[in-house]
Image (cartoon, rainbow, N blue to C red):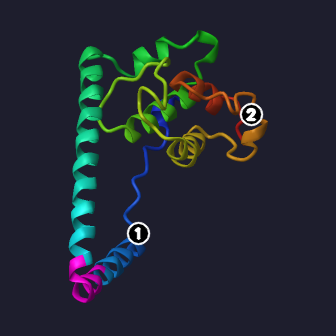
């Protein structure tokens, strides 16, 4: 009997690590000591930090609006339309579902993906997030060997979501 990709394990949502909370508490304590010992310098530093946060917020808002406009233009798209857009010889359903769900979870909004979407330019995914989060999890969910990425024939040529599907589908199943 053929295994169906809709029966693959769902995405695992990891709980925040307690180390994160310890780090934040230590950071808050250090900031409190800094403000207490150097109030004038702390005021300048906090003002610069606030300006940085405002600029970051404005850039993020502009980026989200662009993705929202793209999502509105693609309304009605789904994983089915994504799979149909791939060449028939490249339709590994496990790789398609794993990549579609992992990339979809990594971007800020619900966006129907297309194989021609560029990962860095269109979807704004950085290389670190792509390699350490998306590819590793997609390989694991698709039941592919995670080691030997340099032996993958598509290594170093992953620029679009379709390239990522080919990269995940290339390794053999263990």
**Which element carries disc 2, helix, strand or loop?**
loop
- Give the left or right position of residue 59, taking residue 144 as reference: left
- In this orientation, does residue 102 appear? yes
Q: Position of residue 146 (x, y in %)?
A: 67, 46
Element on which disc 1 rests: loop
Q: Compared to 112, does 18 lie above or below?
A: below
Which quadrant, please, contains the N terminus?
A: top right
Across and down, in percent, residue 173 comes to 70, 37
10 Å neighbourhood of mark 2: few (<14), some, or many (≥20)?
some
Tag 2 residue? 152
Q: Is residue 171 above or below residue 14?
A: above
Which disc is residue 168 wearing? none
Q: Position of residue 43 (x, y in %)?
A: 20, 73
Badge 1: residue crowd in 10 Å (few <14, some 14–19, many ≥20): few
Q: Quadrant of residue 101?
A: top left
Q: Main secondary structure of the magenta part?
A: helix
- Magenta stretch, residue numbers: 31-40
Q: Are the residues at dot 1 and dot 2 in contact (C-beta closer than 8 Å)?
A: no
Name the residue located 57 percent from the left edge and 41 percent from the top edge.
135
The location of residue 31, given as percent across then percent down, is 29, 79
Mark 1 vs mark 2: which is more N-terminal?
1
- Real-space CA distance between mark 1 and mark 2, rounded to the nearest whole angstrom: 33 Å
Q: Residue 17: which numbered mark, if any?
A: 1
């Amino acid at each position: 009997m053929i295994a169906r990709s809709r029966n693959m394990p769902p995405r695992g949502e990891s709980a925040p690590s307690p180390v994160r909370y310890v780090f934040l508490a230590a950071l808050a304590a250090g900031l409190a000591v800094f403000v207490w010992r150097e109030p004038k310098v702390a005021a300048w530093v906090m003002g610069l930090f606030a300006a940085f946060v405002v600029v970051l917020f404005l850039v993020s808002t502009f980026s989200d609006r662009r993705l929202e406009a793209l999502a509105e233009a693609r309304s009605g798209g789904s994983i089915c339309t994504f799979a149909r857009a791939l060449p028939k010889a490249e339709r590994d359903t496990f790789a398609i579902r794993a990549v579609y769900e992992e990339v979809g979870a990594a971007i800020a909004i619900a966006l129907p993906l297309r194989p021609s979407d560029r990962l860095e330019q269109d979807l704004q995914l950085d290389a670190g997030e792509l390699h350490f989060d998306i590819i590793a999890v997609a390989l694991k969910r698709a039941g592919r060997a995670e080691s030997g990425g340099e032996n993958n024939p598509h290594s170093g040529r992953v620029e679009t979501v379709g390239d990522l599907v080919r990269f995940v589908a290339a390794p053999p199943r263990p």
